[in-house]
Amino acid sequence: MSASPHPRRTAAIAFILVTALLDVMSMGIVIPVLPQLIETLSGSSASAGMWNGLFVALWAGMQFLCSPVIGSLSDRYGRRPVILVSVAGLALDYVLMALAPNLWWLALGRILAGVTSSSFTSAFAYMADITPPEGRAKGYGLIGAAFSAGFVAGPLIGGVLGEVSLRAPFWAAAALSGLAFLYGLFVLPESLAPDKRMGFSWTRANPFGALRLLRSHPELSSLAVVNFLLYFAHHLFSAVFVLYAGDRYGWGAWQVGALLALVGIMDMGVQGLLTGPVVKRLGDRTTMVIGLSFGAIGVASMGLAPSQGLFVAAMFPNALWGLAMPTIQALMTRHVSESEQGQLQGANNSVGAIAGIASPLFFGTVYSLSVGAHPTLPFIGSAFLIAAAILGGAALIGWRAESGATPQLDISGAGD
């Protein structure tokens, strides 16, 4: 066999990682300035809070609705055109938000961002196409590392540019997305052969139809529950982390920002460097359970930590949580055919979107009940302990789900 496909696969993996990095950087760049721009356009901090919450819900809602559609389109037409169109659309969306004269235009931009950001489903499906089942956890770990790098670099760049102008980060985000499009246009090969594609159907492409795929056999259903619980617990950080650090330890913005940057760097190391060797030695299932278990230990330790030093120390076992996401994804890909990888990733993204809507509301409520002069919950770290229990339950479900499971990889219907 010729060795020529190997450089093409290397180039394809490099493209996916570079695109993921650029896309996440472009999203991260606008994080420091979007609330300020909303406040400027709304005219008051009170109404800005309402609008900002609405924008978060709009983005997550579009992810829920559109991720299965994007995934199914990539199963029908291939990964390359769907990824390129999505990345180009994201670049144009940031231009729209940079020029937005009022909140309604900015809201339209957030809706379009939710649609175009659904290209991540095709990126994960692309990685499944070009890697063997035993190598997918490592591949997904590399994508996770690229995400982490983007979330570390993006807000830092956005913060610097935001000092120049509130609109400057949006222009920079547009430029990064445009660069990703041009890079992919000239580098990215198609990964899904025509004979392995599946006809497009709205029955499968709507989010509820896509979620039916997750119920197609017991192991996949259980892993979908584990995936939901992982996402749900992870949104603890976006919901209450900043408030908790300020209320309990008196930390300001720069301390929290530095710690979040440290979290991103550790996550990048775990997913990019550690996942592959650990999976090779222990297997996907054991690695997943180890990741979820250490996540539970780390989160519980954060909630119980009586001092700043112990809180920071708890971030190190918590970093091993990063072993769970790529291995869950890898295990799930083994239970569907090659022609259903896009639909699977779309369904997974919809699950994440549901968690992204419900979890911040839940943990925000729990935290509000655990602070104040007369809290209903007597312990300020209650939200962290609940999240730890959720991760512990996810580890148990994941262990039982894959005990004796037989992967199903029949592709006889791929061309239907």
Image: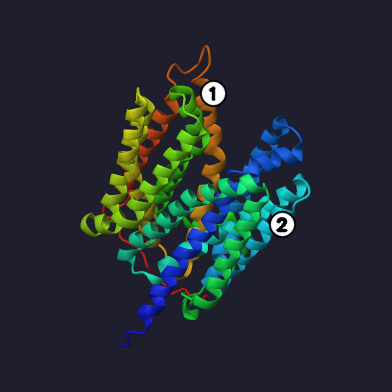
Q: Residue furthest front?
A: 164
| Quarter containing the N terminus | bottom left
Q: Amino acid at mark 1?
A: Ser
The answer to which of marks 2 and 1 sits earlier in the sequence is 2
Q: Read off the residue under disc 1.
A: 368
State the SS at label 1. helix
| Residue 127 pos. (x, y %) | 42, 66
Please say if 212 is above or below 249: below
The image quadrant that residue 234 belongs to is top left
Density class for disc 1 (Cα within 10 Å; few <14, some 14-19, many ≥20) is some
> Residue 117 location, x and y as percent?
58, 57
Residue at 40% x, 36% y is 390
Residue at the image position 35 percent from the left and 53 percent from the top: 271
- Residue extending farthest to the right is 101
Q: Residues within 10 Å of mark 2 (few under 14, many from 20)?
A: many
Front residue of 228/242: it is: 242
Q: How is the image coloured?
A: rainbow
Image check: 336 left or right of 395?
A: right
Measure how far apart labels 2 and 1 are at the Cα level: 36 Å
- Give x and y (percent) for residue 416: 52, 75
Q: Is residue 285 left or right of residue 66?
A: left
**Residue 58 place in picture, x, y as percent:** 65, 46
Can you name the residue that lies furthest to the bottom here? Answer: 2
The local secondary structure at tag 2 comes to helix
Q: Nearer the viewer, residue 283 or 304?
A: 304
- Label 2 amino acid? Leu
> Which residue is pictured at 61% across the width and 62% down the height?
175
The residue that appears at 32% across and 84% down in the rendered structure is 3
Q: Decide if residue 415 is in sight here.
A: no
Query: Which residue is disc 2 drawn over?
Result: 96
- Label at residue 143: none
- For the residue pair 381 and 199, the one nearer the viewer reads as 381
